[in-house]
Image (cartoon, rainbow, N blue to C red):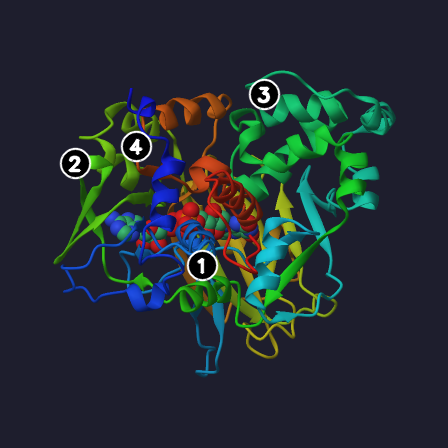
Amino acid sequence: MWGSGLKPGKALARCILAPGFQRRGVGGHRSGVDGNSESARVIVLGGGLSGLLAAWHLHRRGCAVEVWEASPVPGGWAQTLPWPGPEGQPGYLERGPQGLLVGRDGALDHLLRDLELDLRPTQPKGPRWLGKGGRRQPSPATLTGLLRAPGLGLAGKARMLAEPFIPAGSGTAENLQDFFARRLGEGFAREVLPALVAGVLAAPPERVGLEALPRLKRLEARGGLLLGGLRAGPERTCLPTGGTGALARTLAERLGCVITSQPVQALEPLPEGRWQVHGEGLTREAETVVLALPSHGSAQLLRPLAPGAARELDAIPQLDLRGWHSRHAMVPSWERGIGLLVHPPEGRGLLGAVSLAADDPRGVPGLLQLRAYVGGAYPVAPDLTAWAGVFAELRRWLPELGEAVQVREEACPGAFPLLEPGHGARVARLQADLPPGLHWLGAARFGPGVPDLAEGIAAWAESLSVPRAAGGRS
Ligand SMILES: Cc1cc2nc3c(=O)[nH]c(=O)nc-3n(C[C@H](O)[C@H](O)[C@H](O)COP(=O)(O)OP(=O)(O)OC[C@H]3O[C@@H](n4cnc5c(N)ncnc54)[C@H](O)[C@@H]3O)c2cc1C
């Protein structure tokens, strides 16, 4: 097995301690696409949030690092794209997250503070609903909504109140359905959970392992969802000025070592545990390579080097999502933004929709900007492959919605990795098969939520036992 050789952390420590590379500015280290003569200490493959976060932590530890990103712009899914209004007014849409859920003192909280990212003040949110039983109900994500959740009954509600007294589970491959049934009761798991999980992970809770939402395990270890949540403190939604894409943009700017339009094509092992990275018109040597690519991309590179790890990566299902962005006349009382979750399969593939607040600078004044999600692991009715069908389905739950003045479809192939029950064991097998000097990170390892990626990558960096740069905080 590859894992029995040099510990990956040691290779990184060598990179930090090598004379001449200590605290070397990464910006100064970058050589252009024709700079084949220089070698980088660490090459991060993939300039999505995972790769940028990995590079950020290495950079803060004084490591000379460079990022290779295939597309012309870094950020991966986390990009804010221009979408001018009907008369050419400035406007934007998000390719991925519309906002960032930030827990107090978590890795994402630290990162936002370190980057001094300009954030819009958090505003109260507008109405949130659950579409279920053919009717629109208050969202169960709020306490009042939860107490009025349809189908729960008195016994179901009473069972939820017992949650603080439920001991932590000991199973290793629990799925979300079993976890919530154990903690909050069968009623909650059957009547409420599917819409919540579909809205976040686009999959049925019985198909998703607990590893997809690592925060749940942490809360359970701190006394349960209620007590652990109280101890951890409230989470807030942060909206960076300039959209959530500003996070990736700022990371890339501060790093100064992201080479865009530079797809990696192959990895070649060299003597003494070094690596040669081959790309279009560029070949570079590195002591350490970090794979922060979509799973299939990492699998492709690893196939000749670590077939076992490649097989594990290939076995992680990827969920395709379709996002429909639309602009409509503003609906009175929806100015603070709305949210809708649909209890699957009632939406026939429509999982939910969310709108921007009227004063959100990404939107166009006077218009309601909505994003609807379709697909994921759920079958999509044939008429929902076109806007007319999606709009008709939306109107079933949101009858106030007028005809769209603008529509744009954003296909999101492979939007989410499906972390199935037992994913932790798969990750352990994969890691054991990785050759020394190669690291693997990303949503398929830590879960797709940006806070989970931030947490997982900060812990990964911490585990490298590399001294921190003075004043650095990761
Ligand atoms: C529609 C949608 C909505 C979402 N909403 C939320 C949300 O509300 N909250 C939340 O927390 N999370 C959300 N997420 C999840 C979150 O955005 C992702 O999990 C996260 O951005 C993944 O980052 P990543 O770097 O791991 O992967 P990616 O963003 O996929 O980045 C991988 C990068 O690798 C690059 N690449 C591919 N092949 C190569 C190659 N050969 N060489 C070099 N580079 C290569 C790609 O171009 C890409 O930039 C959402 C995701 C989507 C798609």
- N-terminal of the two: label 3 or label 2? 3
- Whether tag 2 and tag 4 are in contact, CB under 8 A, the answer is no
- Whether tag 3 and tag 1 are in contact, CB under 8 A, the answer is no
- N-terminal of the two: label 4 or label 3? 3
Residue 184, position as x, y percentages in the image: 76, 26
CA distance separating discs 1 and 4: 35 Å
**Circle 2: residue type:** Pro
CA distance separating discs 3 and 2: 42 Å
- Whether tag 1 and tag 4 are in contact, CB under 8 A, the answer is no
Judge the density around disc 1: few (<14), some (14-19), many (≥20) Cα neighbours within 10 Å: many
Q: Quadrant of residue 308?
A: top left
Q: Is mark 1 within 8 Å of ligand 1?
A: yes
Q: In the rendered image, which residue does mark 4 sit on?
A: 436
Q: In the rendered image, which residue does mark 3 sit on?
A: 174
Relative to residue 194, is residue 429 depicted above or below?
A: above
Residue 197, position as x, y percentages in the image: 60, 37
Front disc: 3 or 1: 3
Front disc: 2 or 4: 2
Q: In the rendered image, which residue does mark 2 sit on?
A: 271
Q: In the rendered image, which residue does mark 1 sit on?
A: 95
**Circle 3: residue type:** Glu
